Image: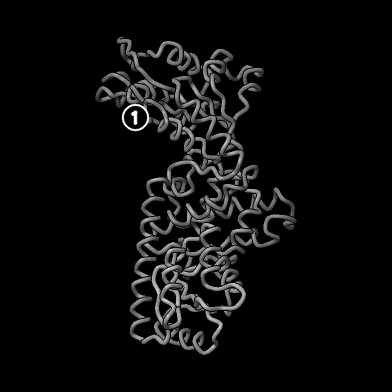
Amino acid sequence: MANLLIVDDDANIRDSLRDRFVARGHDVSTAVDGKDALVKIRRERPDLVLLDLQMPELDGIGVLQKLQQDGIDLTVVVITAFGTVDRAVQAMKNGAYDFIQKPFEPALIEETVKRALERTTLQVENRALRAGKEEAGPVAEDPRSKEILELAGKAAKSSATVLLLGESGTGKEVLAHEIHRRSPRASGPFVAVNCVAIPETLLESELFGHEKGSFTGAIARRQGKVELAHRGTLFLDEIGDIAAGFQAKLLRVLQERAFERVGGNETISVDIRVVAATNRDLKTAVSEGKFREDLFYRLNVVSIPVPPLRERRGDIRVLVQKFVAGAARESRRPAPKVPEEVMKILEAQPWPGNVRELKNVVERAVVLLEGDELTPGDLPAEMMAGGGGGMPGGFHDQVAEQRKQIVKEALERCGGNQTRAAEMLGLQRTYLARLIRQMGL
């Protein structure tokens, strides 16, 4: 059923319409004039507005014009008195879907509302389809994010190696995808390798491939990720964690775009563009002798810092809506509403786990939601304790407890299967296993 807002300065009409549509199972709120209507529209975002045109102070036309100015897209049916069809036409030019005349037949208004709600449903589905196509793309509402996206766009035009720097969970892989999408190599493959998730003994085979019989279990020739990325983009995530012994082999690929498969003698040349990412301070690692200086300079041709979510809070609102829509599609349910109260709580959080943590919190809330609107009670309890500021027990203790609870719930939902839990949380299995040990779970 839908959420309706009835706007009319005539109490009899308001009450009559409210009772009629409540009886049909809809949630109905009312407003006495245009100003009251705008307040409730911004707060409640109804599915449909029944709007009287003739009202004191701010009339129906004024409400429609204000909605257009604010970029609020709603389905509105206007109510007009007999003999004022020209006003109804004006209303439709200002965004109204349809109009009905007073006095109206009950069957007519019910049919009009039914058609209007079908239109609303179609709009929601179309937005969901567009969101599905765009979901993998980066969100850039915050000024800092816009700067980063602009820099990424410039870098994409060349074949220069790009190094993305930032904390875990900030969306570095999403940005790498965007660089590939905007590049001349967009029609080629995008091949991602998480360097920390692959044991050191298998990393060479994973990247370079192997010949049949080159080691136990190598029952056939296998192409590696570097070869598969030919004429496309190779994304090396967590590049700062690769072992010192492997760094020289990777350096050769960057310098010569050539390699040999494990157990093979043939030199294979590739045409690839490399994008790498790390949450480490590579300059410090170089000074400490943990990372090759020549490899660092080969990687650091174009460096793009990806700021943590707490430094680009302007993205949070759009990210929340994006994750709500995605979780709703996965759960095969209508996307629930996110009231302003909930949004402000989410915007106030420190988000030490960045976008990945925000996504987990939102998806968990949507999956477990029984109604059609998120409430503060659907969020982790510690978030309600001051909305992220002044939390009892100390900031770091609260963050640690929240992370532990998220991991615990994921394990419970996955029956203790760490691989499935890692996928749900957007973490590497090896990293999740380390967290589980640290947390004593």
Q: Position of residue 89 (x, y in %)?
A: 41, 69
Crowd tier of the residue under label 1, counting other residues whose Cα lies within 10 Å: few below 14, some 14–19, many 20 or above: some
Question: Which is nearer the eye, 302 or 29?
Answer: 29
Please state which amino acid type lies under the numbered disc 1. Answer: Pro
In the image shown, does 389 or 206 lie closer to the viewer? 389
Say if 119 sits above or below 347 in the image: below
Q: For this rendering, which residue is in front, 300 or 132? A: 132
Q: Secondary structure at mark 1?
A: loop
Query: What kind of colouring is applied to the model shown?
Result: one colour
How many marks overall?
1
Quarter of image, res 113:
bottom left
Q: Position of residue 331 (x, y in %)?
A: 39, 60
Question: Residue at left 48%, top 45%?
Answer: 426
Residue at 33% in and 17% down: 261
Q: Position of residue 285 (x, y in %)?
A: 63, 22
Q: Is residue 40 above or below residue 247?
A: below
Q: Residue at x 36, y 20 (%)?
A: 208
Q: Is residue 229 visible?
A: yes
* Residue 201 spot, x, y in % from top left: 43, 24
Q: With 374 as the anchor, is 121 left or right in this view?
A: left
**Is residue 135 depicted above or below 183 in this figure?**
below
**Left or right of residue 273: residue 71:** right
The reply to whether residue 200 is visible in this rendering is no
Residue for point 67% across, 59% down: 387
Q: Which residue is mark 1?
A: 189
Quarter of the image with the N terminus in it: bottom left
